[in-house]
Image (cartoon, helix red, strand yellow):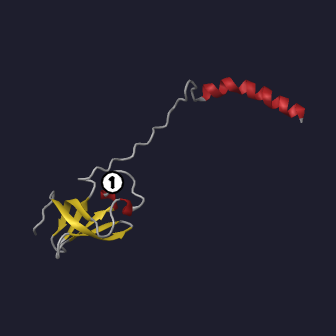
Amino acid sequence: MKYSVGQIVEGVVTGLQAYGAFVQLDSDTTGLIHISELSDGYVKDISLFVKVKDIVKVKVLDIDDKTHQLRLSYKAIHDTPRKSRPKPSREKQGDTIGFSTLAAALPQWIITAKRRNHEH
């Protein structure tokens, strides 16, 4: 086999499926970029990364000697950073969240509720 694990290769995207993209490296060798190897982040639509007939550079992750199929990675050599999600904050600006906050607010809520019930 003329390819080796870890090698950077170039090929043409020949097909897209929900689970990945097929790449033709030469007349005898094809490979698959599994959807998990497109990006470190969530991939909703493979075509946002590659399209049929695109020429792509990929890294060889594994080789099946019997079928000449390669397992390929796009994210290993392309900058596909995970989108940073804001971490949920335990505190709002100046306000704390928790049972003590509820306990402090409860007496006023009771007074307000009693007033509303007497008005109706």
Q: What element carries label 1?
A: loop
Residue at the extreme bottom: 27
Q: Residue sitting at 23 percent across and 53 percent down? A: 77
Report the quarter where the C terminus lies: top right
Q: Which of 60 and 57 is in front in this view?
A: 57
Tell me if residue 120 comes above or below residue 34 in the rendering.
above
Q: Which of 47 and 95 is in front in this view?
A: 47
Q: Residue sitting at 58 percent across and 29 percent down? A: 98
Tell me if residue 30 comes above or below residue 82 in the rendering.
below
Q: Mark 1 points at which residue?
A: 39
Tell me which corner region of the image, top left, top right, bottom left or bottom right, holds residue 25. Answer: bottom left
Crowd rating for badge 1 (residues with CA inside 10 Å; few <14, some 14–19, many 20+)? many
- The amino acid pointed to by label 1 is Ser
Q: Residue sitting at 19 percent across and 63 percent down? A: 10
84 relative position to 1: left or right: right
Tell me which corner region of the image, top left, top right, bottom left or bottom right, holds residue 72. Answer: bottom left
114 relative position to 38: left or right: right
Residue 87, percent across and down?
45, 38
Residue 13, percent across and down?
28, 68
Count of numbered marks: 1
Q: Residue sitting at 12 percent across and 62 percent down? A: 4
Tell me if residue 113 comes above or below residue 26 in the rendering.
above
Residue 19, percent across and down?
36, 65
Q: Nearer the viewer, residue 111 or 60?
A: 60
Residue at the extreme left: 2
116 relative position to 4: left or right: right
